[in-house]
Amino acid sequence: GAGVSQSPSNKVTEKGKDVELRCDPISGHTALYWYRQSLGQGLEFLIYFQGNSAPDKSGLPSDRFSAERTGGSVSTLTIQRTQQEDSAVYLCASTPTLGSYEQYFGPGTRLTVT
Amino acid sequence: DQQVKQNSPSLSVQEGRISILNCDYTNSMFDYFLWYKKYPAEGPTFLISISSIKDKNEDGRFTVFLNKSAKHLSLHIVPSQPGDSAVYFCAATRPHTGANSKLTFGKGITLSVRP
């Protein structure tokens, strides 16, 4: 079946602009995660959605970052007033149930803030 | 404060030989560990995992060893193949508490397998 998809694959934006990154999880997966990988770093947890529960936003680096998950499926990560340090690959992952540890990742969105 | 550490940024091995990728962690609450493999321009893909109640898990050419007392795990690839060349991430997670099951990742190790 189809895997996790993300769009756009690449995004170049000017400092100060807002960007939206989209994630389509695997159909039926109840949990959805956003991570980012900055140059030379590991994957950094951002936010986690599980079913209808309140999201875990503990990884969001600032209030310029927000995310939504509509209808328990598609998720959008929004970065307002982008800064150069926001440049990274943003990865989305999903898992089928709360008890599943293995996360299935999308290809990521490479964000470059100029 | 890195809770999962992959101290060697790269490893180069000859095809057919063993690749040993190491990972250390500091948080004793971690109870499940995973290895992910990542090719350029692709997302990480799950490779193998191990629960803290075990000390070894094997899947084909891949074996993960866990030493809880040393807070150390390693991934062995035998025999190594050129297609194994990729970045390998070690990840760890705590028991499910409420809704939080996020993975904590290391920085990754770039493995190069020479033909």
Image: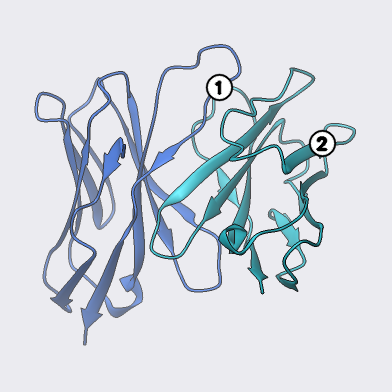
Chain colours: A cyan, B blue
User: Pointers 2 and 1 in contact (CB under 8 A)?
Assistant: no
Q: Secondary structure under badge 1?
A: loop
Nearest to the observer: residue A45 or residue A82? A82
Question: Residue B53: where, in percent of width, then height?
Answer: 25, 20
Question: Residue B113: where, in percent of width, then height?
Answer: 23, 78
Of all chains, the one bearing label 2 is A
Q: Secondary structure under badge 2?
A: strand
Nearest to the observer: residue A63 or residue B14? A63
In the displayed structure, does residue B48 sit left or right of residue A51?
left
**Residue A100 position by quadrant:** top right
Q: Which residue is mark 1?
A: B100
**Residue A9 position by quadrant:** bottom right
At label 1, the amino acid type is Asn
In the displayed structure, does residue A65 sit left or right of residue B80?
right
Disc number for residue A69: 2
In the displayed structure, does residue A90 sit left or right of residue B78?
right
Q: Residues within 10 Å of mark 2 (few under 14, many from 20)?
A: many
